Amino acid sequence: MTHPDVLAPAKLGPITLRNRIIKSATFEGKTPNALVTDDLIEFHRRPAAGGVGMSTVAYCAVAPEGRTEYGQLWMRPEVVPGLRRLTDAIHAEGAAASAQIGHAGPVANAKSNGLPALAPSPSFNPMSMKVTKAATLDDIRRITAAHADAARFAIEGGFDAVEIHFGHNYFASSFLSRKTNHRKDSYGGSLENRARIVRETALAVREAVGDRIAVLAKLNMDDGVPGGFWIDEAIQVAQWLEADGGLDALELTMGSSLLNPMYLFRGDAPVYEFAQAMTQPLVKFGVKAIGKQFIRNYPYEPLFMLEQARQIRAAVKMPLVLLGGVTDKAGMDTAMAEGFEFVAMARALLREPDLINRIAEDERTKSLCIHCNKCMPTIFSGARCVLVERAS
Ligand SMILES: Cc1cc2nc3c(=O)[nH]c(=O)nc-3n(C[C@H](O)[C@H](O)[C@H](O)COP(=O)(O)O)c2cc1C
Protein backbone atom coordinates (compact mmCIF):
# COMPACT_ATOMS: atom_id res chain seq x y z
CA MET A 1 0.00 0.00 0.00
CA THR A 2 1.54 3.34 -1.01
CA HIS A 3 -0.81 5.52 1.00
CA PRO A 4 -1.60 5.50 4.74
CA ASP A 5 -4.06 2.92 6.05
CA VAL A 6 -7.20 4.89 6.93
CA LEU A 7 -7.98 2.35 9.66
CA ALA A 8 -4.58 2.62 11.40
CA PRO A 9 -3.74 5.10 14.21
CA ALA A 10 -2.58 8.58 13.20
CA LYS A 11 -1.24 11.68 14.91
CA LEU A 12 -3.31 14.86 14.80
CA GLY A 13 -1.20 17.61 16.35
CA PRO A 14 -0.55 16.60 19.96
CA ILE A 15 -3.06 13.71 20.00
CA THR A 16 -3.21 10.27 18.37
CA LEU A 17 -6.46 8.95 16.92
CA ARG A 18 -7.10 5.21 16.63
CA ASN A 19 -7.85 5.73 12.93
CA ARG A 20 -8.15 8.54 10.39
CA ILE A 21 -11.95 8.77 10.40
CA ILE A 22 -13.69 11.69 12.07
CA LYS A 23 -17.42 11.99 12.65
CA SER A 24 -18.08 15.50 11.43
CA ALA A 25 -20.40 17.87 13.25
CA THR A 26 -24.13 17.30 12.76
CA PHE A 27 -26.09 19.69 14.94
CA GLU A 28 -27.81 17.37 17.36
CA GLY A 29 -30.80 19.42 18.54
CA LYS A 30 -30.57 17.55 21.83
CA THR A 31 -29.81 20.39 24.26
CA PRO A 32 -33.15 22.07 24.98
CA ASN A 33 -31.79 24.03 27.96
CA ALA A 34 -28.38 24.69 26.41
CA LEU A 35 -26.95 21.97 28.64
CA VAL A 36 -25.69 18.44 27.90
CA THR A 37 -28.41 15.77 28.00
CA ASP A 38 -28.30 11.96 28.13
CA ASP A 39 -29.61 11.97 24.56
CA LEU A 40 -26.65 14.03 23.39
CA ILE A 41 -24.25 11.65 25.16
CA GLU A 42 -25.86 8.60 23.55
CA PHE A 43 -25.77 10.33 20.15
CA HIS A 44 -21.96 10.48 20.37
CA ARG A 45 -21.40 7.25 22.25
CA ARG A 46 -22.84 5.28 19.33
CA PRO A 47 -20.42 6.35 16.54
CA ALA A 48 -17.59 6.11 19.11
CA ALA A 49 -18.62 2.51 19.82
CA GLY A 50 -19.08 2.12 16.08
CA GLY A 51 -15.40 2.70 15.37
CA VAL A 52 -14.74 6.36 14.47
CA GLY A 53 -11.39 7.81 15.50
CA MET A 54 -12.98 11.03 16.80
CA SER A 55 -16.53 12.33 17.20
CA THR A 56 -17.23 16.05 16.80
CA VAL A 57 -19.82 17.62 19.09
CA ALA A 58 -21.60 20.08 16.85
CA TYR A 59 -21.89 23.68 17.35
CA CYS A 60 -20.76 24.66 20.80
CA ALA A 61 -21.44 28.39 20.53
CA VAL A 62 -18.85 30.74 21.98
CA ALA A 63 -21.43 33.38 23.06
CA PRO A 64 -25.19 33.40 23.71
CA GLU A 65 -25.98 35.53 20.65
CA GLY A 66 -23.82 33.18 18.55
CA ARG A 67 -26.28 30.28 18.88
CA THR A 68 -28.34 29.37 15.85
CA GLU A 69 -31.21 28.97 18.32
CA TYR A 70 -31.88 29.39 22.03
CA GLY A 71 -31.51 25.73 22.99
CA GLN A 72 -28.04 25.37 21.56
CA LEU A 73 -25.09 24.67 23.86
CA TRP A 74 -22.93 27.65 24.59
CA MET A 75 -19.62 27.38 26.33
CA ARG A 76 -19.80 28.57 29.93
CA PRO A 77 -18.93 27.17 33.38
CA GLU A 78 -22.35 25.48 33.88
CA VAL A 79 -21.83 23.33 30.81
CA VAL A 80 -18.50 21.81 31.90
CA PRO A 81 -19.77 18.93 34.15
CA GLY A 82 -22.09 17.76 31.35
CA LEU A 83 -19.28 17.98 28.81
CA ARG A 84 -17.17 15.79 31.12
CA ARG A 85 -19.85 13.10 31.13
CA LEU A 86 -20.07 13.37 27.35
CA THR A 87 -16.34 13.10 26.70
CA ASP A 88 -16.02 10.28 29.29
CA ALA A 89 -18.64 8.31 27.34
CA ILE A 90 -16.81 8.88 24.04
CA HIS A 91 -13.44 7.98 25.56
CA ALA A 92 -14.86 4.83 27.16
CA GLU A 93 -15.59 3.58 23.64
CA GLY A 94 -12.00 4.25 22.51
CA ALA A 95 -12.61 7.38 20.42
CA ALA A 96 -11.43 10.96 20.87
CA ALA A 97 -13.79 13.91 21.30
CA SER A 98 -13.74 17.21 19.45
CA ALA A 99 -15.87 20.30 20.16
CA GLN A 100 -16.91 22.42 17.22
CA ILE A 101 -16.67 25.98 18.53
CA GLY A 102 -18.05 28.92 16.65
CA HIS A 103 -20.33 31.92 16.40
CA ALA A 104 -23.32 31.69 14.08
CA GLY A 105 -23.16 35.40 13.13
CA PRO A 106 -25.86 36.10 10.51
CA VAL A 107 -27.19 32.52 10.80
CA ALA A 108 -28.09 33.06 14.50
CA ASN A 109 -31.81 33.23 15.14
CA ALA A 110 -32.15 36.58 16.94
CA LYS A 111 -35.81 35.98 17.74
CA SER A 112 -35.19 32.62 19.40
CA ASN A 113 -32.03 33.86 21.19
CA GLY A 114 -33.68 37.10 22.33
CA LEU A 115 -30.43 38.84 21.33
CA PRO A 116 -29.47 40.66 18.13
CA ALA A 117 -27.55 38.59 15.60
CA LEU A 118 -24.19 39.97 14.45
CA ALA A 119 -22.62 39.97 10.99
CA PRO A 120 -19.88 41.87 9.17
CA SER A 121 -22.57 44.06 7.59
CA PRO A 122 -26.33 44.37 8.18
CA SER A 123 -28.32 41.58 6.54
CA PHE A 124 -31.74 39.96 6.75
CA ASN A 125 -32.27 36.55 8.37
CA PRO A 126 -35.39 34.86 6.91
CA MET A 127 -35.59 32.35 9.78
CA SER A 128 -35.96 35.04 12.45
CA MET A 129 -37.43 37.63 10.03
CA LYS A 130 -35.04 40.11 11.65
CA VAL A 131 -32.21 42.33 10.47
CA THR A 132 -28.73 41.36 11.63
CA LYS A 133 -26.52 44.09 13.17
CA ALA A 134 -23.05 44.98 11.90
CA ALA A 135 -20.47 43.86 14.46
CA THR A 136 -18.47 46.68 16.05
CA LEU A 137 -14.73 46.39 16.63
CA ASP A 138 -15.54 45.66 20.29
CA ASP A 139 -17.85 42.83 19.21
CA ILE A 140 -15.07 41.38 17.05
CA ARG A 141 -12.56 41.55 19.90
CA ARG A 142 -15.06 40.00 22.33
CA ILE A 143 -16.00 37.17 19.94
CA THR A 144 -12.36 36.38 19.14
CA ALA A 145 -11.59 36.20 22.87
CA ALA A 146 -14.73 34.10 23.41
CA HIS A 147 -13.33 31.45 21.04
CA ALA A 148 -10.23 31.24 23.26
CA ASP A 149 -12.44 30.93 26.37
CA ALA A 150 -14.57 28.27 24.67
CA ALA A 151 -11.43 26.26 23.91
CA ARG A 152 -10.43 26.49 27.59
CA PHE A 153 -13.89 25.24 28.61
CA ALA A 154 -13.46 22.41 26.08
CA ILE A 155 -10.24 21.38 27.84
CA GLU A 156 -12.01 21.48 31.23
CA GLY A 157 -14.77 19.39 29.67
CA GLY A 158 -12.27 16.69 28.67
CA PHE A 159 -12.10 17.28 24.91
CA ASP A 160 -9.08 16.17 22.90
CA ALA A 161 -9.62 18.73 20.15
CA VAL A 162 -11.57 21.79 19.12
CA GLU A 163 -12.70 22.55 15.60
CA ILE A 164 -13.20 26.26 14.92
CA HIS A 165 -16.06 26.98 12.53
CA PHE A 166 -14.79 29.04 9.57
CA GLY A 167 -17.45 27.83 7.15
CA HIS A 168 -21.04 28.01 5.94
CA ASN A 169 -21.28 31.82 6.18
CA TYR A 170 -21.40 31.76 9.95
CA PHE A 171 -19.67 34.69 11.69
CA ALA A 172 -16.05 34.14 10.59
CA SER A 173 -16.91 32.82 7.15
CA SER A 174 -19.26 35.70 6.41
CA PHE A 175 -16.29 38.03 6.94
CA LEU A 176 -14.36 36.09 4.27
CA SER A 177 -16.97 36.73 1.59
CA ARG A 178 -17.25 39.95 -0.39
CA LYS A 179 -20.94 39.18 -0.78
CA THR A 180 -21.63 39.40 2.96
CA ASN A 181 -18.78 41.68 4.07
CA HIS A 182 -19.15 45.32 2.98
CA ARG A 183 -17.07 46.81 5.77
CA LYS A 184 -14.79 49.75 5.20
CA ASP A 185 -12.52 49.12 8.22
CA SER A 186 -9.56 46.77 8.69
CA TYR A 187 -11.90 43.73 8.60
CA GLY A 188 -13.37 44.48 5.16
CA GLY A 189 -12.24 45.16 1.60
CA SER A 190 -9.04 43.32 0.62
CA LEU A 191 -8.76 39.57 1.16
CA GLU A 192 -6.10 40.28 3.76
CA ASN A 193 -8.63 42.34 5.71
CA ARG A 194 -11.50 39.89 5.22
CA ALA A 195 -9.28 37.03 6.42
CA ARG A 196 -8.08 38.93 9.50
CA ILE A 197 -10.78 37.49 11.73
CA VAL A 198 -10.06 33.82 10.93
CA ARG A 199 -6.34 34.34 11.40
CA GLU A 200 -6.76 36.19 14.70
CA THR A 201 -9.26 33.62 15.95
CA ALA A 202 -7.03 30.63 15.12
CA LEU A 203 -4.08 32.24 16.89
CA ALA A 204 -6.17 33.25 19.93
CA VAL A 205 -7.38 29.65 20.31
CA ARG A 206 -3.89 28.24 19.89
CA GLU A 207 -2.49 30.65 22.45
CA ALA A 208 -5.22 29.61 24.89
CA VAL A 209 -4.66 25.85 24.56
CA GLY A 210 -0.95 25.50 23.70
CA ASP A 211 -0.38 21.86 22.83
CA ARG A 212 -2.84 20.44 25.35
CA ILE A 213 -5.40 19.62 22.63
CA ALA A 214 -5.51 19.57 18.83
CA VAL A 215 -6.91 22.62 17.02
CA LEU A 216 -8.69 22.14 13.69
CA ALA A 217 -10.69 24.60 11.63
CA LYS A 218 -13.56 23.88 9.25
CA LEU A 219 -12.87 26.25 6.38
CA ASN A 220 -15.05 27.10 3.38
CA MET A 221 -13.42 26.53 -0.01
CA ASP A 222 -16.28 28.31 -1.75
CA ASP A 223 -19.70 29.55 -0.72
CA GLY A 224 -21.47 28.42 -3.90
CA VAL A 225 -22.89 31.93 -4.16
CA PRO A 226 -22.16 34.25 -7.11
CA GLY A 227 -19.87 37.02 -5.90
CA GLY A 228 -19.08 35.11 -2.70
CA PHE A 229 -15.90 33.51 -1.35
CA TRP A 230 -14.27 31.36 -3.99
CA ILE A 231 -11.53 28.72 -4.26
CA ASP A 232 -8.79 31.12 -5.43
CA GLU A 233 -9.27 33.16 -2.25
CA ALA A 234 -9.61 30.02 -0.11
CA ILE A 235 -6.20 28.80 -1.31
CA GLN A 236 -4.60 32.03 -0.12
CA VAL A 237 -6.44 31.91 3.21
CA ALA A 238 -5.36 28.28 3.76
CA GLN A 239 -1.75 29.31 3.05
CA TRP A 240 -1.96 32.16 5.56
CA LEU A 241 -3.48 29.87 8.19
CA GLU A 242 -0.69 27.37 7.58
CA ALA A 243 2.02 30.03 7.82
CA ASP A 244 0.53 31.42 11.05
CA GLY A 245 0.96 27.99 12.63
CA GLY A 246 -2.14 28.07 14.85
CA LEU A 247 -3.85 24.98 13.44
CA ASP A 248 -3.12 21.25 13.38
CA ALA A 249 -5.46 20.54 10.46
CA LEU A 250 -8.05 22.05 8.15
CA GLU A 251 -11.34 20.32 7.46
CA LEU A 252 -12.49 21.52 4.05
CA THR A 253 -16.11 22.45 3.45
CA MET A 254 -18.26 24.68 1.25
CA GLY A 255 -21.65 26.35 0.98
CA SER A 256 -23.70 28.90 2.86
CA SER A 257 -26.31 27.95 5.46
CA LEU A 258 -28.25 31.12 4.64
CA LEU A 259 -27.67 31.69 0.92
CA ASN A 260 -27.14 28.21 -0.55
CA PRO A 261 -27.65 25.44 2.00
CA MET A 262 -27.80 22.43 -0.35
CA TYR A 263 -24.39 23.25 -1.82
CA LEU A 264 -22.78 21.78 1.27
CA PHE A 265 -24.82 18.56 1.13
CA ARG A 266 -25.80 17.74 -2.47
CA GLY A 267 -28.70 15.39 -3.15
CA ASP A 268 -32.43 15.92 -2.69
CA ALA A 269 -33.66 19.21 -1.21
CA PRO A 270 -36.09 18.39 1.63
CA VAL A 271 -38.28 21.48 1.14
CA TYR A 272 -41.53 19.92 2.37
CA GLU A 273 -39.89 18.53 5.51
CA PHE A 274 -38.24 21.89 6.18
CA ALA A 275 -41.56 23.70 5.97
CA GLN A 276 -43.11 21.12 8.32
CA ALA A 277 -40.31 21.66 10.84
CA MET A 278 -40.90 25.43 11.05
CA THR A 279 -42.96 26.57 14.03
CA GLN A 280 -43.57 30.20 13.01
CA PRO A 281 -46.49 30.33 10.55
CA LEU A 282 -44.93 33.11 8.43
CA VAL A 283 -41.63 31.25 8.06
CA LYS A 284 -43.49 28.00 7.31
CA PHE A 285 -45.47 29.80 4.62
CA GLY A 286 -42.27 31.38 3.21
CA VAL A 287 -40.46 28.04 2.99
CA LYS A 288 -43.48 26.48 1.23
CA ALA A 289 -43.83 29.43 -1.18
CA ILE A 290 -40.22 30.08 -2.22
CA GLY A 291 -38.33 27.17 -0.66
CA LYS A 292 -37.68 25.49 -4.01
CA GLN A 293 -35.72 28.53 -5.26
CA PHE A 294 -33.85 29.05 -2.03
CA ILE A 295 -33.12 25.39 -1.18
CA ARG A 296 -31.77 24.45 -4.59
CA ASN A 297 -31.04 20.89 -5.66
CA TYR A 298 -27.49 19.83 -6.52
CA PRO A 299 -26.81 16.33 -7.81
CA TYR A 300 -25.06 14.14 -5.27
CA GLU A 301 -21.75 12.51 -6.12
CA PRO A 302 -19.36 10.53 -3.93
CA LEU A 303 -16.45 12.73 -2.73
CA PHE A 304 -18.20 15.81 -4.05
CA MET A 305 -15.70 18.24 -2.52
CA LEU A 306 -12.63 16.50 -3.93
CA GLU A 307 -12.09 18.77 -6.92
CA GLN A 308 -11.78 21.93 -4.83
CA ALA A 309 -10.01 20.14 -1.97
CA ARG A 310 -7.31 18.94 -4.38
CA GLN A 311 -6.46 22.56 -5.12
CA ILE A 312 -5.99 23.28 -1.42
CA ARG A 313 -3.97 20.04 -1.10
CA ALA A 314 -1.62 21.25 -3.83
CA ALA A 315 -1.14 24.61 -2.09
CA VAL A 316 -0.40 23.65 1.55
CA LYS A 317 1.54 20.96 3.40
CA MET A 318 -0.51 20.98 6.62
CA PRO A 319 -2.81 18.04 7.41
CA LEU A 320 -6.17 18.20 5.62
CA VAL A 321 -9.45 16.44 6.30
CA LEU A 322 -11.50 15.48 3.26
CA LEU A 323 -15.26 15.76 3.82
CA GLY A 324 -18.31 15.37 1.60
CA GLY A 325 -19.70 12.10 0.31
CA VAL A 326 -17.19 9.84 2.05
CA THR A 327 -19.25 6.72 2.71
CA ASP A 328 -17.12 3.64 2.03
CA LYS A 329 -13.61 2.18 2.10
CA ALA A 330 -12.99 2.92 -1.58
CA GLY A 331 -13.71 6.64 -0.98
CA MET A 332 -11.48 6.65 2.10
CA ASP A 333 -8.64 5.02 0.14
CA THR A 334 -9.02 7.59 -2.63
CA ALA A 335 -8.77 10.37 -0.04
CA MET A 336 -5.57 8.83 1.37
CA ALA A 337 -4.12 8.31 -2.12
CA GLU A 338 -4.87 11.96 -2.94
CA GLY A 339 -2.77 13.02 0.04
CA PHE A 340 -5.43 13.84 2.65
CA GLU A 341 -4.49 12.79 6.18
CA PHE A 342 -8.05 12.27 7.49
CA VAL A 343 -11.61 11.87 6.26
CA ALA A 344 -14.77 13.18 7.91
CA MET A 345 -18.26 11.76 7.56
CA ALA A 346 -21.69 13.05 8.55
CA ARG A 347 -24.82 11.59 6.96
CA ALA A 348 -23.56 8.04 6.52
CA LEU A 349 -22.88 7.87 10.27
CA LEU A 350 -26.33 9.25 11.11
CA ARG A 351 -27.74 6.38 9.06
CA GLU A 352 -25.40 3.76 10.58
CA PRO A 353 -23.31 4.77 13.60
CA ASP A 354 -21.52 1.40 13.47
CA LEU A 355 -20.49 1.77 9.81
CA ILE A 356 -16.75 2.02 10.52
CA ASN A 357 -16.64 -1.24 12.46
CA ARG A 358 -18.53 -2.92 9.64
CA ILE A 359 -16.12 -1.51 7.04
CA ALA A 360 -13.21 -2.72 9.17
CA GLU A 361 -14.74 -6.21 9.16
CA ASP A 362 -15.52 -6.20 5.45
CA GLU A 363 -14.15 -3.45 3.25
CA ARG A 364 -16.83 -4.06 0.62
CA THR A 365 -19.49 -2.72 3.04
CA LYS A 366 -21.63 -0.03 1.41
CA SER A 367 -23.42 2.74 3.29
CA LEU A 368 -27.21 2.63 3.46
CA CYS A 369 -27.46 6.46 3.33
CA ILE A 370 -29.40 7.55 0.25
CA HIS A 371 -28.62 11.28 0.77
CA CYS A 372 -32.34 12.11 0.80
CA ASN A 373 -31.28 14.83 3.26
CA LYS A 374 -34.40 14.38 5.33
CA CYS A 375 -32.03 14.29 8.31
CA MET A 376 -31.45 18.03 7.81
CA PRO A 377 -34.76 19.35 9.17
CA THR A 378 -34.56 16.90 12.09
CA ILE A 379 -32.00 19.23 13.70
CA PHE A 380 -35.04 21.11 15.05
CA SER A 381 -36.41 18.04 16.85
CA GLY A 382 -33.35 15.82 17.52
CA ALA A 383 -31.02 14.95 14.63
CA ARG A 384 -31.57 11.50 13.17
CA CYS A 385 -31.83 9.52 9.98
CA VAL A 386 -35.54 9.33 9.20
CA LEU A 387 -35.04 5.85 7.74
CA VAL A 388 -34.03 4.51 11.14
CA GLU A 389 -36.81 3.75 13.59
CA ARG A 390 -36.69 5.97 16.66
CA ALA A 391 -35.65 4.27 19.90
CA SER A 392 -38.15 6.39 21.86
C1 LIG B 1 -28.33 16.86 10.18
C2 LIG B 1 -27.06 17.58 9.87
C3 LIG B 1 -26.59 18.59 10.73
C4 LIG B 1 -25.40 19.26 10.45
N1 LIG B 1 -24.92 20.18 11.36
C5 LIG B 1 -23.70 20.74 11.17
C6 LIG B 1 -23.12 21.59 12.14
O1 LIG B 1 -23.66 21.81 13.23
N2 LIG B 1 -21.92 22.13 11.87
C7 LIG B 1 -21.27 21.90 10.69
O2 LIG B 1 -20.18 22.43 10.49
N3 LIG B 1 -21.78 21.09 9.75
C8 LIG B 1 -22.96 20.50 9.97
N4 LIG B 1 -23.46 19.63 9.03
C9 LIG B 1 -22.69 19.36 7.80
C10 LIG B 1 -21.83 18.13 7.93
O3 LIG B 1 -20.86 18.26 8.96
C11 LIG B 1 -21.10 17.83 6.61
O4 LIG B 1 -20.30 18.97 6.33
C12 LIG B 1 -22.02 17.56 5.43
O5 LIG B 1 -23.13 16.77 5.82
C13 LIG B 1 -21.28 16.84 4.29
O6 LIG B 1 -20.74 15.62 4.75
P1 LIG B 1 -21.41 14.18 4.37
O7 LIG B 1 -21.44 14.10 2.88
O8 LIG B 1 -20.49 13.17 5.00
O9 LIG B 1 -22.77 14.15 4.96
C14 LIG B 1 -24.66 18.95 9.28
C15 LIG B 1 -25.13 17.93 8.44
C16 LIG B 1 -26.31 17.26 8.71
C17 LIG B 1 -26.76 16.17 7.78
Image (tube, grey):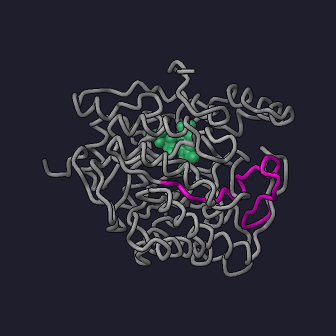
Most foreground residue, 135 or 144:
144
Q: Residue 318's image quarter?
A: bottom left
Most foreground residue, 165 or 113:
113
Residue 298 in percent (x, y) is at 55, 37
In this orientation, does residue 263 appear?
Answer: no
Q: Residue furthest front?
A: 81
Q: Which residue is at a point 83% across and 35% down the rendered structure image?
A: 280
Residue 386 in percent (x, y) is at 55, 23
Residue 301 in percent (x, y) is at 43, 36
In this orientation, does residue 312 appear?
Answer: yes
Q: Residue furthest left?
A: 1
Magenta residues? 99-122
Q: Quadrant of the C terminus?
A: top right
In magenta stretch: residue 113: yes
In magenta stretch: residue 179: no
Query: Considering only vertical position in the picture, is 70 above or below 199?
Result: above
